[in-house]
Image (cartoon, coloured by chain):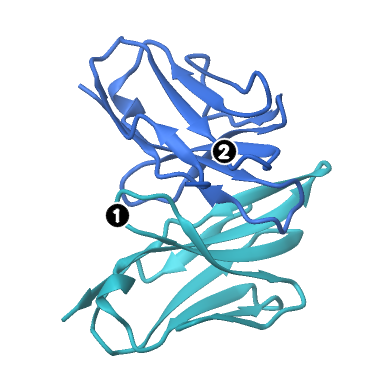
Chain colours: A blue, B cyan
Amino acid sequence: DTGVSQDPRHKITKRGQNVTFRCDPISEHNRLYWYRQTLGQGPEFLTYFQNEAQLEKSRLLSDRFSAERPKGSFSTLEIQRTEQGDSAMYLCASSLAGNTNEQYFGPGTRLTVT
Amino acid sequence: KNQVEQSPQSLIILEGKNCTLQCNYTVSPFSNLRWYKQDTGRGPVSLTIMTFSENTKSNGRYTATLDADTKQSSLHITASQLSDSASYICVVSFRTSGTYKYIFGTGTRLKVLA
């Protein structure tokens, strides 16, 4: 499978715990995006990388959130001290640089904070 | 404020019928508009992309239109099938500070009944 993959697909955690999600983009794609989506809403932009550089972070990305893409390939999104409001689907997408280049989305990681 | 609004919020139709989904935007300066299909629990999949100069774009039974003057787009689904049941998300791209940004609508949830 040469699409975008995310791991895990589902994560249930207790409030206050840390969680880390992984995204493997399409191999030749140099851009990688993270989005958060809650039920009945469209995806909300969190951050994006071009190669290993994190070029933009949304105001939604509080200090408890951190993302990395150390070698310009896979990326991780970590949430520290999770809160119930963090429960959502976390989507990763990748694309080639350029505005009309399509973003290919992964299947998402559904996080439930109890 | 850059916004994308979709209507209706949800729609139920019978298999074989046609339907049209609407997307109005206030994004400026406009770069392109995409329609995505998102199955429940999955990541969005691109259906069409249109730039400023394009009025219509088709992808099988899906036809998107764009009126850049009125800032409106529609997605027409012909001869609906049960597998068309999904959320349809309109995404508008604009350029700012040398980078492109994407504004997602909240989606229209379509249910096709046998």
Q: Chain of mark 2?
A: A
- Residue B82 lies, in percent from the top left, at 25, 75
Q: Residues within 10 Å of mark 1 (few under 14, many from 20)?
A: few
Looking at the picture, does residue B109 appear above or below residue A39? below
The residue that appears at 48% across and 59% down in the rendered structure is B45
Residue A16: mark = none
In the drawing, does residue A31 fall left or right of residue B5?
right
Tell us which disc is closer to us: 2 or 1.
2
| A54 shown above or below B111 | above
Residue named by callout 1: B40
Residue B8: x, y in percent? 36, 71
The percent position of residue A107, horizontal first and vertical second, equals 40, 44
Q: Which residue, given by chain and number where applicable, does mark 2 sit on?
A: A25
Count of marks placed on residues: 2
For the residue pair A48 and B60, the one nearer the viewer reads as B60
Question: Are both tags, 2 and 1, on one chain?
Answer: no
User: Does B1 sit left or right of A55 as displayed?
Assistant: left
Q: Residues within 10 Å of mark 2 (few under 14, many from 20)?
A: many
Label 1 residue SS: loop
